[in-house]
Image: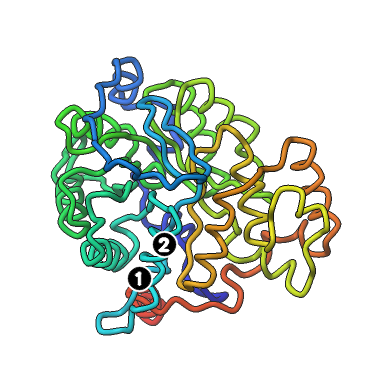
Amino acid sequence: MQQGQFSRRSVMAGGLGLGVAAAAAPVGALGIGRAMAQAPAPAATAQVRPEGWLREGAITRAFPRTGERVPAIGLGTYLTFDLLPGDKREHLFQVTKQFWEAGGRLVDTSPLYGTGEVNLGHFAATLGIADQLFITNKVWSTGEFLADDSHAKRSLDRSMQRLWRSQIDAMQCHSLVNVDVILPIMMAWKKEGRIRHLGVSHHQLEYFEPMAQWVERGGLDVVQVHYSIHTRVAEERIIPAAAEKGTAVLVNMPFEKARLFKIVEGRPLPDFAKEFGATTWAQFFLKWVISNPAITCAVPATTNPDHLRDNMGALTGPLPDQAMRDRMVRHMEGIPGFDSLGKMPMYPGKRYPGIIARAQAELRARS
């Protein structure tokens, strides 16, 4: 994404008044959210995975409420899996194939990610793994009126069709949109066996306060949050609350939308990276994230099969202890530009010309 393009942040700020208002209000302000938080969580429908589903030697973590284990490195699909109809996509098929072969199992997607669900579903079905991937998805819905679930239901049905699934492993209220209404709807889906885990997601720091409130109330199986060696705010409240309440933690933006790589461009890894088996900067950044024992899975995204293999290298071998994690942070703080990373353009040197970029360009031209 180049400077001047719309971001998810600008779209949310300008166009989703209901969702933002709900997120900014006290948790349970609509009444429904309070009932959801106080109600006992229904049991997730059991999902039987094939014997040997987890690759031997891979670092795995459990979803605390169900005990189901997943590899600690997953795959994100925002922008990367969004293509224009007819565009070449063999490279993304290879990303999916090599992710599976390297021991990856959890893939995070969303209806908002353009053709992301369609492409992921096609690749997974072609590989014969559509029902074996651990799919974490999202719903972004306001409905026609308060407590109307028609939009959310259509979103879920469409997602399952695109992904060749009859059940979603984890569903998240995308960016807290209409959260007081959506969480009880997801509770119903879980009770009905349509989803197995429920939770919330966000990536903007200004929404961490309401997200922390939801985690602290309990009732969430999973929370997805922005966390990296640069952005560590989630350590203050969200991650400790998740550990206390038995909530799995998924991590988005572990590479800060490729900006971390720009900062270390041309720089060698520090010698001490050998102590925890990191041979590349990608593994350095990912091992820092998943060495926090409260983190369930980090979900970096890529369009490059070589980068995919590099990322998956962080799934094996030793992890840094707390003293080493602190040393890694101090090393990064000594690199020029690290302290001002947030001012850098996102995705430096990269382009993702899918239907999202096309729609953003058309909107800019009109407005």
Q: Which residue is mark 2?
A: 78
Q: Position of residue 149 (x, y in %)?
A: 16, 40
Query: Looking at the picture, does residue 69 appear above or below residue 113?
Result: above
Decide which of 184, 95 is in the foreground and name it: 95
Q: Secondary structure at mark 1?
A: loop
Horizontally, residue 322 falls left or right of residue 59, namely right
**Which element type, helix, strand or loop, lies under badge 2?**
loop
The 10 Å Cα crowd at callout 2, few under 14, some 14 to 19, many 20 or more, is many
| Left or right placement of residue 291 versus residue 295 in this view | right
Which residue in the protein does label 1 denote?
82
Residue at 45 percent of width and 54 percent of height? 13
Q: CA distance from mark 1 to mark 2?
A: 7 Å
Q: Is residue 156 left or right of residue 294?
A: left
Q: Amino acid at mark 2?
A: Tyr
| Quadrant assignment, res 291 | top right
Q: Residue at x 40, y 38 (%)?
A: 200
Q: Which quadrant is home to the C terminus? A: bottom left
User: Looking at the picture, which amino acid does disc 1 mark?
Assistant: Asp
Contact check, label 1 and label 2, Cβ < 8 Å: yes
- Residue 22 higher or lower than 95, as above or below: above
Instruction: From the top left corner, tell me how far across and down residue 264 is, in percent.
Output: 74, 67
The percent coordinates of residue 326 (x first, y second) are: 79, 41
Toward which corner of the image does residue 353 lie, by quadrant? Answer: bottom left
Q: Is residue 126 above or below residue 49?
A: below
Q: Tell me if mark 1 has few (under 14), some (14-19) or many (20+) residues whose alpha carbon lies within 10 angstroms of its own.
A: many
Q: Residue furthest right?
A: 334
Q: In terms of depth relative to the viewer, which is nearer, 346 or 328? A: 328
Question: Residue 242, image x and y in percent?
Answer: 51, 28
**Would you say 306 lies left or right of 175 here?**
right
Q: Residue at x 82, y 59 (%)?
A: 270
